[in-house]
Image (cartoon, grey):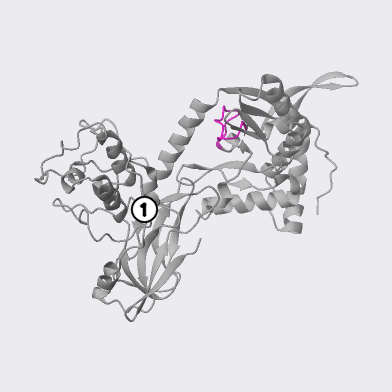
């Protein structure tokens, strides 16, 4: 997908800045904040707008030095990849009247749209409209080109637009708002339109919100990522019947080897050696033994993935959760796994993950031991069929079998909690898999050399 589209207008080189492709399976993004106002001069690679997908937040930079002529979207709009978000003058000098030639351009011919309300409307290139509803209504509320385009094609008057409750920034009407209105409007007679008198009340009349009258509680608005996580978790529980199997593993040999070799490992490879890559190695081995765990569901079909893309759930400083993915985890030795784990964790904390970094996972591990928890019941990361929670490693007295008889010794123990989708993974497969992971951890070679 090209980053911009160019054309010659008078003596200016005007281009259309398009919403860039941001990774696999990412088809749209929300415009969260304009960094640059229309008419402002911008230097190459400076950010002009902040956008958010259902995966990560990012910025769109300016392609070259120039002037941002006009925004073709509004904050809060949900925009399709490849759609026009702004007009940009490559030779501009900040002239305030540069927007006039841009808006005078006739929009490119759009494909025919079915008469019935359809999502096809939003696929059109968003250019400034010559006719139809105005940019601002009598209330002063701004309407984006996308919203006005849908309104014009569906015969929605300005009075109807003004009467809608907007869920976008400052009560603006978004794509979802107007499409929802169109869907419900189909049941009413076409003549039954609201009067053309503008509604004097503020537009942002959303559903009543909770109010702490006596100060007994604080009200915290969910940020965008928390809303996405909430939707993802609810959908997962509604989709997959979750079953969780628990296994306790004696990881004393692994702990002692790591403690004895972590300094030498870092000196040799320049990578910090945590427990995560050591456990990831055992998980990958167990997936090879039980490939049915490395799967996803597509309708009534089970897709067994040949590649092992291991997700590692991580908590962000904000408290939100994100799952970067170690692609082709089965192709790395311990040094490679450590490098991948450290790189993804560092970029997650810095907010520098890309959509591709968190896409394509086939199985996920979640380290609840980081918070001092000994076990947990994790929720499956759809469309996968399993997720493994790693409990805290604790020293406890345990019974050991020796040639001289049973003895009690202090050992490093941890719980593994495996949640799996009971539609496709039964107890034998789900339980055998987590037991095999524990076997690999318990069978760790205490004399193992540091890998190259």
Query: Where residue 250 sits: x, y (%)?
Result: 74, 29
Which residue range is magenta in the image? Answer: 371-387
Residue depicted at 49% across the width and 64% down the height: 2
Q: Nearer the viewer, residue 93 or 161?
A: 161
Label 1: state its secondary structure: strand
Query: Where residue 64 sits: x, y (%)?
Result: 44, 74
Q: Nearer the viewer, residue 97 or 313?
A: 97
User: Image quadrant for the C terminus?
Assistant: bottom right
Asked whether the viewer can see residue 252, the reply is no
Residue depicted at 44% across the width and 35% down the height: 231
- 419 sits left or right of 221 in the view: right
Q: Which residue is mark 1?
A: 32
User: Is residue 391 one of those drawn in magenta?
Assistant: no
Residue 203's place in the image compared with 424, above or below, is below
Residue depicted at 16% across the width and 53% down the height: 140
User: Is residue 376 one of those drawn in magenta?
Assistant: yes
């Amino acid at each position: 997908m090209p980053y911009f589209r160019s054309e010659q207008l008078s003596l200016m080189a005007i281009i259309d800045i398009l919403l860039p492709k941001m990774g696999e399976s990412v088809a749209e993004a929300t415009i969260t904040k304009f960094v640059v106002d229309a008419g402002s001069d911008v230097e190459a690679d400076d950010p002009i707008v902040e956008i958010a997908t259902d995966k990560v937040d990012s910025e769109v930079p300016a392609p070259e030095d120039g002037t941002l002529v006009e925004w073709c979207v509004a904050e809060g709009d949900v925009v399709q990849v490849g759609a026009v978000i702004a007009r940009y003058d490559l030779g501009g000098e900040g002239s305030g009247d540069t927007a006039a030639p841009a808006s005078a351009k006739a929009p490119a011919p759009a494909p025919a749209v079915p008469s019935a309300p359809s999502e096809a409307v939003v696929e059109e290139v968003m250019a400034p409209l010559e006719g139809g509803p105005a940019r601002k209504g009598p209330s002063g509320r701004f309407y984006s080109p996308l919203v006005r385009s849908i309104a014009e094609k569906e015969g929605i008057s300005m009075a109807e637009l003004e009467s809608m409750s907007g869920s976008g920034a400052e009560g603006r009407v978004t794509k979802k708002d107007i499409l929802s209105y169109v869907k419900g409007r189909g049941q009413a007679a076409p003549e039954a339109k609201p009067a053309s008198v503008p509604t004097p009340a503020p537009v942002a009349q959303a559903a009543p919100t909770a109010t702490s009258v006596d100060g007994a509680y604080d009200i915290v608005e969910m940020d965008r990522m928390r809303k996405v996580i909430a939707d993802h978790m609810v959908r997962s529980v509604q989709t997959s019947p979750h079953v969780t199997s628990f296994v306790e593993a004696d990881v004393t040999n692994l702990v002692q080897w790591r403690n004895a070799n972590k300094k030498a490992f870092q000196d040799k490879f320049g990578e910090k050696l945590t427990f995560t890559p050591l456990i990831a190695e055992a998980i990958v081995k167990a997936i090879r033994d039980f490939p049915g765990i490395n799967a996803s569901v597509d309708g009534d079909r089970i897709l067994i993935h040949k590649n092992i893309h291991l997700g590692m759930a991580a908590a962000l400083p904000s408290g939100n959760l994100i799952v970067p993915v170690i692609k082709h985890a089965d192709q790395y030795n311990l040094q490679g796994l450590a490098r991948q784990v450290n790189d993804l964790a560092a970029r997650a904390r810095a907010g520098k993950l890309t959509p591709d970094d968190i896409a394509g996972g086939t199985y996920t591990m979640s380290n609840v031991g980081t918070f001092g928890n000994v076990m947990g019941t994790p929720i499956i990361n759809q469309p996968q069929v399993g997720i493994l929670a790693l409990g805290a490693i604790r020293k406890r007295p345990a019974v050991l079998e020796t040639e001289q008889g049973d003895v009690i010794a202090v050992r490093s123990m941890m719980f593994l909690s495996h949640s799996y989708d009971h539609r496709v993974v039964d107890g034998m497969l789900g339980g055998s898999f987590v037991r095999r992971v524990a076997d690999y951890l318990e069978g760790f070679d205490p004399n193992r050399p540091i890998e190259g």
